[in-house]
Amino acid sequence: MFVINCPYCGEREQSEFKAGGEAHIVRPKQPTELSDDQWAEYLFMRKNIKGIQFERWVHTHGCRKWFNVVRDTSNDMIKAVYKMGEKPPTK
Amino acid sequence: MKNKYSFFSLVKNAFSYHENWEKAWKDPEPKKEYDAIIIGGGGHGLATAYYLAKKHDMKNIAVVEKGWIGGGNTGRNTTIIRSNYLWDASAGLYDHALKIWEGLSQELNYNVMFSQRGVMNLAHNLQDVRDLKRRTHANRLNGIDAVYLNTEQVKKFCPIINTSPDIRYPVLGGTLQRRAGTARHDAVAWGYARGADEMGVDIIQNCEVKGIKRNGDRVEGIETTKGFIKTKKLGVVAAGHSSVIANMAGLKLPLESKPLQALVSEPVKPIIDTVVMSNAVHAYVSQSDKGELVIGAGTDDYVSYSQKGSHDIVEGTLNAILELYPIFSRMRMLRQWGGIVDICPDASPIISKTSVKGIYFNCGWGTGGFKATPGSGDLFAHTIANDEPHKLNAAFNINRFVSGDLVDEHGAAAVAH
C-alpha cells in the first residue's frame, strides 16, 4: 500500500489506481510481418524486474488518465512520475 | 538409514524428554560439483530432488535455498488441495498430484496431515451457475469426482453459510469435490527434505544464487554466496523470484510477480469442517486443526517483491467473508502476511525445458501451487532426468506462448487468479 502522485490530480492512495504493467513496450509497426516468436515476445514476455521498474498506471477512480511511474518493486518506493509521451527520467 | 517414525519411536523418545531425536536432515556445505542442482528449497523443489533420487536413480543432487527450507510460499499458503480444473491438461496435472497426496504420509513416513474434508466452490450469479455446471461435467469426464449442489444442499453441507436471497451476492449453488481438502504445509517441506536427505541429497540452506554460468547454449554451474558449484542440469523452482533467476541465465519468462495475501484468526472451537471457496466475491475459508480460520485474499494488480499486500485487498475479502458468514463478525484476526507469486498470462504453470541446454524451469504456479507439490515434483524430476517432459506436463511447456496453445485456466479454474 502506497501513495501515488498523479501528474494531473496530485497525491492519492494507490487503491484509486489500476496498474497497467511494464511501460515502453512498443506496439509492432508491421504486425503482419511478425514471426510467432516476436508476437510471443510482445504479448507475453516481461522483464518482471526486482528493483527499478518503469510501468504504466491509470487513475481509475479519479481523472482516468494514463501515466508512467518509476518504482522500486523490492520495496514499493516510487522514484518518479511522468506523463505519457514524455521521455523516461535517466537518473 | 534413518530411524522410522512410529508409535514406538515416540514412546522411546519420551523417556529422554524428546531431546535426542535424530536430525531430520543434515546441514552440509556444498560440494564442487553435482549431477543436478535444484534452486529453491520449497515444497516443489524438495519434491523434485526427492523424486530425482527415488525414481530416476540420481544420487548426486543438491537443493540450494536462499533462506531456510519451506520458508517461502510453502509456509505461507492456505493449504488447499483440489483437482477440479476445467481443461483436460490441468485436470491430468492436478489429479496426478491429488493421487500422490492420498498416500504421501505413508510414502514419506511423515504425517503431512492430509485431510480430505472436501472443497466447495460457490456460485453467486447465473453465469457462475453455468460455468460451475460445465466444470462439473468436464471433471467427471476426466474421472475427477465432482457434484453440483443447489442452494439447499450447500446449506446442508455447510450450515453456517448465509443462503438468504437478500444478500448482495446470494448463493445460487455450488460444486463439491469430496476428495479435495487440506494438508499441513510445513510438514510437506520437512517430509520431502527428510526423504531426500536420506537418499543422499544435499540440502544447502542460507545459500543464495548470485549468477548462472553458461557456456554458449549450455549451463556450466551456479555462482552462490557459498562459492561456485558446477552442474550439467539445473532445475529452477524459485516461485516469485523465477524471473530474477531467469535474467541471470539470459532468459525471459512470461511471468509477473505479485503479492498474494492470507490471514488467520484467533483459534476457536470447530465451526467449519470443509473448505469453501467463492470466486465471484473472492473469499475462501477453512479451519486449521489448531482452530484458526484460514482466509485467502486476492493478489494486488501490480508487480511487487515486497512481501506485503494492500490493505484494501484484505478489506474486500473480509467484507465478502462477513456477508457469507455473519457468525464470524466478532472474530479477531491474529496475523496477516503476503507471499510473492509468479503468475502466467494463462494462469497455468510452466514445467519445461528452455532454450539453454540443461536449464529447466518449474514456475508460474501463481496463486495455486501448493496443491500440486507432489505431482509437480514428480513430473519436473521426470523432465530433468529424461530431458523430455512426461505426457502429463507436455502441455505446460514454455513454447505454448509462441504456439498459442495456452491452457487458459483464468476464471475456469474455479477461483479467480
Image (spheres, coloured by chain):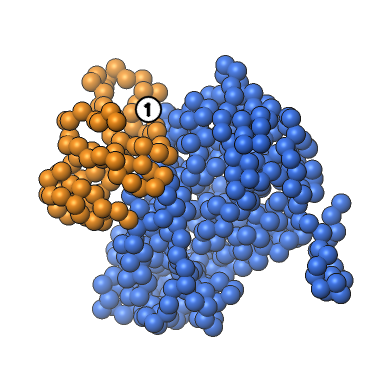
Chain colours: A orange, B blue
**B355 on left or right of B197:** left
The residue identified by callout 1 is A41
User: Residue B1's spot in the image, x, y percent?
Assistant: 87, 51
Query: The numbered mark 1 sits on a residue in which chain?
Result: A
User: Residue B284's spot in the image, x, y percent?
Assistant: 43, 66
Q: Looking at the image, can residue B67 be seen?
A: yes
In the image, farthest residue toward the front: A91
User: Residue B395's spot in the image, x, y percent?
Assistant: 51, 37
Mark count: 1
Whether B324 is drawn above or below B360: the answer is below
At 54% across and 68% down in the image, what residue appears?
B118
For residue B16, what is the image quadrant? bottom right
Q: Looking at the image, can residue B52 be seen?
A: no
Q: Nearer the viewer, residue B202 or B319?
A: B202
Q: Nearer the viewer, residue B205 or B349?
A: B205
At 19% across and 52% down in the image, what residue appears?
A11
**B113 on left or right of B201:** left
What's the residue type where badge 1 is placed?
Glu
At 40% across and 41% down in the image, what residue appears?
B256
User: Residue B101's spot in the image, x, y percent?
Assistant: 65, 57
Q: Secondary structure at mark 1?
A: helix
Whether A91 is drawn above or below B195: the answer is above
For residue B357, what is the image quadrant? top right
